Structure formats: structure tokens, C-alpha cells
């Protein structure tokens, strides 16, 4: 996030898209709701589903799944044509405005309606509301990123924010809501195929030299590695062995039959996790690890806030902390990693990570700090890009809409959307072991519109079979108005009705993220 969670409560406008925030980020949603209830904040929701926050919204734009670039360009078309954009900001802090202007010129409200289904007057109203706000924040999640055009969609979000001068401003910004705890910290620390700590590119010789010197090795590989789906695709071929830590691709990756087939081809599979997950059941070796409450360390959350994690209880049985397991494996493979404790690891991290350089355990004992925090007397950074962008001027990108990789047809006439629900987390390896949570959400329910349910002859509670070009699942149906006719939604937490048996492994060409959010399916009443 460029800004902070608490700022949502004081934003004049929050534009929320691709996030069922009350289910995925309930704490963050409370700040948004308080802002609306207080009268300070106007909320714009852009979502194909009727999520809970629609009831708090000033405007709800109900777009067809996968058409986000079109409505974003449409809003910018309105803002530019009505001269509502921040002229001074655009002139002083950005470049390539003419390219943006030309790119969005054809995305008139009429054209946007043809692509997205959003009515012209609603698009115009939302554009004016966002552009005329003194400070407007955009919040989004994986609903707009898990598409083959996800990278381009995020660029469009940045275009819109810069166009109205909302980057580098308190209560504004571009604010991606991260999908899992400490995924921000993992990325900050180089758990990416193309970067080391603090997003320092592995292709940069100076970066490699710095890390090689710190780690006492001759060199560091200069080629970016593979992403998750690319690894699965290469398993059994280029990749002979795989070491999976804290991940459950047998439920979380698209095209599950292909995932199982690929993992079975490996010569050797190691899984390190706190529970025997569906993936761990396939492993040659399982390394039991400690959970968050059984170890010391830090988490970095979605607003870049680094916080201490303190050990509350001892790990059970033979479980050990992740860092201890990794260090011992490294030593046995010939490279000694001699750290006495988690704090010693953090000290090395901050010396190699400029944005963390001023953060110490001593300071964190008094409360969390937001990076960048370059020195030990720096207070941390509430919002980014206050005076200038890292690259100097903000760059506008000319982006054009392209449809999802798979469209409904006569054989597979429904659009399937996947996501999460409040009571379960990711692949359910933790939450589905909770009796209380299972009582709240014991089984997978696929949401379907009343019109479609009537045509299929099904009612809430009936069993239906969903089929795609990749697989099929049978689950119970929930009939209502949360989805439009022709669309269905199901969560991916349930192994017995795994949504990712249906999803497609088509990738964004830049980020290589799969298109989890849109694929074509057939729905039938189950025998």
C-alpha cells in the first residue's frame, strides 16, 4: 500500500474494486465502514458480485468479470473530457500524459457499457465523484490482478490515481490489499524469482556483488527464476526435485489435475508445513515446522508495517522453526548458516535492505514501523511518494482492453469466479481444523442467480456438478442475487469441492499470475 490502513477512515472517496473486503480483510473494512457512517467518506464499489460493502456504497458499478481495464479507461475518458483531472500534478509530477489521453479517447461511456455492462450515467457519476474528491483512495485485491491482463489493470489503476493527483497524498494513494499474512514481508525479503531484498533486481551486477560479499560466496546467479505455475509446468522435466515451504499447491494452484500429474513426475518432493496438507500427503519427506505462535520473528503487513512476532508456546513434537530447518539443511549441503536466534537474522536483513535499515528489535518492542525507514532515528513512512516518485516522474501507460483468455460458449455457458469467504483462510489447512469455523461454513456453496437456478431446476441446498475443460466438481448450490445471470461464484477453500480443478492456468505475460478469476464452466443438476 502506498498509504496506511487508518487513512481509509478519513478519505473523501474510497474506490474499492476486486476485493470482498468484509470477507478477506475484515479489519480494513471496518475503517472504510466507519468513514462512510461518519459522513466523511463516499464509497465507490466496482464488483461483479453484490458484496456486503455495496450496502455502504454511494455508487456500485457491476462490471462483467475481466473487463476492468475498460471501465478504468472509461472513467479516465470522462475525467479528461470534462477537464476534471489535476492539471498541475499531471504537468509537474508525471510524463506521457498525451499517450494516456490518446489511449482512453475511444473508451466512451457508450463503448464501456458494451464491454462491461456498466450504465453510462453510473460510470460518469463514479468518475466525477472520484475526480472531484480532495483526497481519494483506491483499494484493490486479487479480483483485478488474477487475470491474464492483471499487470495492465494495475497500471490503469495507477494511471487513474496519478491523473487526479492522488499519489503522494495523505488519505489517497494506490492500495493493494495483500492476500495473506506476511506476504508483503516475504516479497520484501526477496521471495520473488527476479529480485533480492527490497526488490533489488538480480540482473544488476552491483546488487549481486553486494549480496555475494555479505554472504561470503563467489557469485550469485544472474538469471531470474521461475514463478509458481512455471515451476509446476517444469516439474518432472527441467525440475527433478521440489522443496515446498508453507504452500499447498494441490488446492491453491489452477488446473489441479495438471498440478497432481506434475508433482507425481518429480524424483523427490519435500514439504515443510505445520499440518499434513493435501500437498504434504504427496511428499517423500515432510518437515514439521512451528506456527506463528511458536516462534520469534517479524511480520510485515499490507501497509508496510513491520511488527514483532513473539513466541507464546513451544512447538509440538519434533516441529522446529522454519529458519532452524533451513539453516541445518544448508549446513548439511556445505554452506554454514550460523545464526544464534531470529534477531541475528533480522540484523543481517536490515543491513542488506535499505528500506528496513532503521528498524531494530529494540524499536519494534515499542510498536510497529512502516518502511521505508532508512535510519534508526527515522519515524517510518505513513504514505509514499510525498514529494516525488522513486523514478522521478510518474509514468502514464497507454493500456488497451483485451478479453479474458476463456469466454463462455454453448458447451460451457457460465462464467466462474473464485475467491474467499470470511470463515476460512486460503486452502483451509488451518481454519478447517477449527470446529467453530467449520460450524459457520461447513461446506462449499456455489452461488448462482435465481434465473439460472430456475432454468436448471435447482434450489438452495441441491447438489450441482460444475465442469470445465480441465475437470469437474460436485457441490451444493446457494441461490440468490449475489451474482448476475450467467455467472457463478465458488470459494477455493474446500478440498472435497476444489474450485481449482476448474480454473485455467493461463498466465499474465508479465507477472505470470494465473487467471483464477475467470473461466468458462457448465452447471448441471447432479444426479
Image: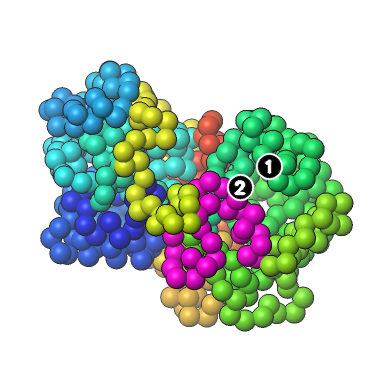
Horizontal side, residue 466 vs residue 143: left or right: right
Residue 482 % position (x, y) = 31, 56
Magenta-highlighted residues: 342-371
325 and 238: which is toward the camera: 325
Q: Check disc 1 and report its element: helix, strand or loop.
A: helix
**Residue located at (84% from left, 48% from top):** 267
Characterize the local packing of mark 2: few (<14), some (14-19) or many (20 or more) Cα atoms within 10 angstroms. Answer: many
150 and 181: which is toward the camera: 181
Residue 400 % position (x, y) = 36, 25
Q: Quadrant of residue 228?
A: top right
Tell me the colour scheme of the image: rainbow
- Which residue is disc 2 drawn over? 352
Residue 165 % position (x, y) = 24, 37
Question: Is residue 232 among the parts visible in the rendering?
Answer: yes
- Which residue is disc 1 drawn over? 211
**Residue located at (41% from left, 66% from top):** 422
Characterize the local packing of mark 1: few (<14), some (14-19) or many (20 or more) Cα atoms within 10 angstroms. Answer: some
Amino acid at each position: 500500500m502506498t498509504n496506511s490502513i487508518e487513512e481509509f477512515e478519513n478519505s473523501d472517496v474510497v474506490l474499492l474494486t476486486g476485493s470482498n473486503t468484509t470477507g478477506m480483510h475484515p479489519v480494513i473494512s471496518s475503517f472504510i465502514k466507519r468513514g462512510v457512517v461518519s459522513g466523511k467518506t463516499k464509497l465507490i464499489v466496482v464488483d461483479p458480485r453484490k458484496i456486503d460493502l455495496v450496502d455502504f456504497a454511494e455508487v456500485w458499478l457491476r462490471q462483467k468479470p475481466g473487463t476492468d481495464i475498460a471501465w478504468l479507461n472509461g472513467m479516465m475518458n470522462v475525467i479528461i473530457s470534462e477537464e476534471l483531472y489535476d492539471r498541475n500534478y499531471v504537468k509537474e509530477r508525471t510524463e506521457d500524459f498525451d499517450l494516456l489521453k490518446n489511449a482512453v479517447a475511444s473508451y466512451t461511456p457508450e463503448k464501456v457499457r458494451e464491454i462491461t455492462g456498466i450504465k453510462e450515467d453510473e460510470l460518469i457519476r463514479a468518475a466525477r465523484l472520484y475526480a472531484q474528491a480532495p483526497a481519494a483512495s483506491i483499494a484493490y485485491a486479487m479480483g483485478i490482478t488474477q487475470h491474464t491482463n492483471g499487470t495492465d489493470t494495475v497500471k490503469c489503476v495507477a494511471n487513474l490515481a496519478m491523473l487526479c493527483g492522488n499519489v503522494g497524498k495523505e488519505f489517497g494513494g494506490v492500495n493493494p490489499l495483500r492476500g495473506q499474512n506476511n506476504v508483503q514481508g516475504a516479497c520484501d525479503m526477496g521471495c520473488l524469482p527476479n529480485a533480492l531484498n527490497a526488490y533489488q533486481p538480480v540482473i544488476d551486477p552491483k546488487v549481486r556483488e553486494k549480496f555475494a560479499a555479505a554472504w561470503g560466496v563467489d557469485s550469485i546467479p544472474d538469471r531470474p527464476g521461475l514463478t509458481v505455475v512455471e515451476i509446476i509446468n517444469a516439474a518432472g522435466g527441467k525440475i527433478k526435485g521440489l522443496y515446498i515451504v508453507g504452500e499447498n499447491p494441490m488446492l491453491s494452484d489452477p488446473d489441479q489435475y495438471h498440478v497432481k500429474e506434475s508433482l507425481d513426475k518429480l524424483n523427490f518432493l519435500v514439504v515443510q508445513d505445520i499440518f499434513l496438507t493435501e500437498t504434504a500427503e504427496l511428499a517423500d519427506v515432510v518437515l514439521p515446522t512451528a506456527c506463528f505462535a511458536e516462534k520469534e520473528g517479524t511480520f510485515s503487513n499490507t501497509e508496510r508495517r513491520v511488527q514483532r512476532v513473539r513466541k507464546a508456546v513451544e512447538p509440538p513434537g519434533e516441529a522446529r522453526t522454519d529458519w532452524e530447518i533451513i539453516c541445518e539443511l544448508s549446513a548439511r549441503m556445505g554452506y554454514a548458516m550460523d545464526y544464534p536466534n531470529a534477531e541475528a537474522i533480522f540484523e543481517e536483513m536490515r543491513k542488506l535492505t535499505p528500506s528496513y535499515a532503521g528498524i531494530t528489535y529494540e524499536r519494534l518492542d515499542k510498536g510497529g514501523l512502516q518502511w521505508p525507514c532508512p535510519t534508526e532515528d527515522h519515524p517510518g513512512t505513513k504514505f509514499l511518494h510525498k514529494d516525488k516518485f522513486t523514478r522521478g516522474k510518474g509514468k502514464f501507460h497507454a493500456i488497451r482492453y483485451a478479453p479474458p483468455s476463456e469466454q463462455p460458449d454453448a458447451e460451457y455457458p457460465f462464467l466462474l469466479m473464485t475467491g474467499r469467504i470470511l470463515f476460512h483462510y486460503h486452502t483451509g489447512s488451518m481454519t478447517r481444523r477449527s470446529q467453530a469455523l467449520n460450524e459457520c461454513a461447513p461446506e462449499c456453496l456455489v452461488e448462482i442467480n435465481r434465473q439460472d437456478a430456475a432454468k436448471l431446476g435447482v434450489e438452495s441446498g441441491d447438489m450441482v456438478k460444475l465442469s470445465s475443460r480441465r475437470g469437474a466438481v460436485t457441490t451444493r448450490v446457494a441461490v440468490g442475487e449475489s451474482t448476475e445471470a450467467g455467472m457463478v461464484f465458488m470459494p477455493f477453500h474446500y478440498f472435497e469441492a476444489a474450485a481449482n480443478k476448474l480454473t485455467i492456468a493461463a498466465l499474465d505475460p508479465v507477472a505470470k499470475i494465473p487467471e483464477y478469476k475467470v473461466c468458462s464452466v457448465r452447471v448441471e443438476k447432479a444426479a
